[in-house]
Image: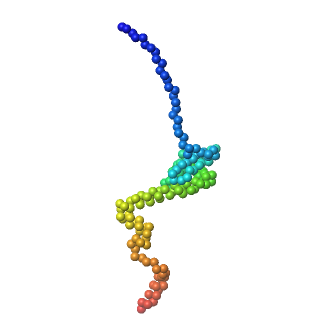
Amino acid sequence: MKTKNKKTVKKKTRKKTTKSVAIKTDLLVPKDYAHKITDANFPDFFIKKSSNAWWMSLGKVEALIGAFKIDATIEEALVSAGITYDQFRYFREEHPEFSQIIDVCRQLPNLRARRSLVLGLDDDPKLSLQYLKAKKPQEFSSGNSVNVGVQVNMADNVAKNREEFAV
């Protein structure tokens, strides 16, 4: 058997490179702040740095905001975030703009319900009429009442009628 002369070939090894990850500039926060929360429903919210405050855990702040987005009470939101009322009160003192975020978040379910209702008006005439009765009662109310601004004291009328018909 013939054997061929084998050449040894050195394989070129590639250096392992890490892919560069694009950093979004909206994630950068000023030096006095620990976190930045960006949400389409409210302006960017910067969370202040603190040595051992509960809000250094971004998950707790997000849980708090998430609870307010479903119109939770303060107590329910605190349970959701796993914090006490005193911790919440101190957070609001340190971040006064958070009160506005709570107000905005609590309006979101109302807007979703309103959008759902209005979008359903085309498909349900009874729903449309109920909506109009609530929004324009003067025009679409089925009641026959008329307010003429006259006050009537029924006790006086009853007493007067008893006198007239007394035997």
Rendered residue at 49%/23% (across/down): 13
Q: Position of residue 123 (x, y in %)?
A: 35, 60
Q: Quadrant of the N terminus?
A: top left
Instruction: Answer whether residue 154 is visible to the viewer in this image.
Output: yes
Q: Position of residue 14 (x, y in %)?
A: 50, 25
Residue extending farthest bottom: 167
Q: Residue at x 59, y 48 (%)?
A: 47
Front residue of 135 and 155: 135
Drawn side of residue 39 relative to residue 126, left or right: right
Q: Is residue 35 above or below residue 133?
A: above
Tell me the quarter of the image containing the C terminus. bottom left
Q: Is residue 75 visible?
A: no
Seen at 49% across and 22% down, the residue is 12
Residue visible at 40% across and 74% down in the picture: 143
Which color scheme does this rendered protein use?
A: rainbow
How many numbered marks does the figure carry?
Answer: 0
Q: Residue 83: x percent and y percent?
A: 57, 49
141 and 80: which one is in front?
A: 141
Q: Is residue 164 above or below residue 23?
A: below
Residue 36: image location, x then y, percent: 57, 47
| Above or below, comparing residue 48 to residue 148 in the picture | above
**Horizontal relation, residue 160 to residue 43: left or right:** left
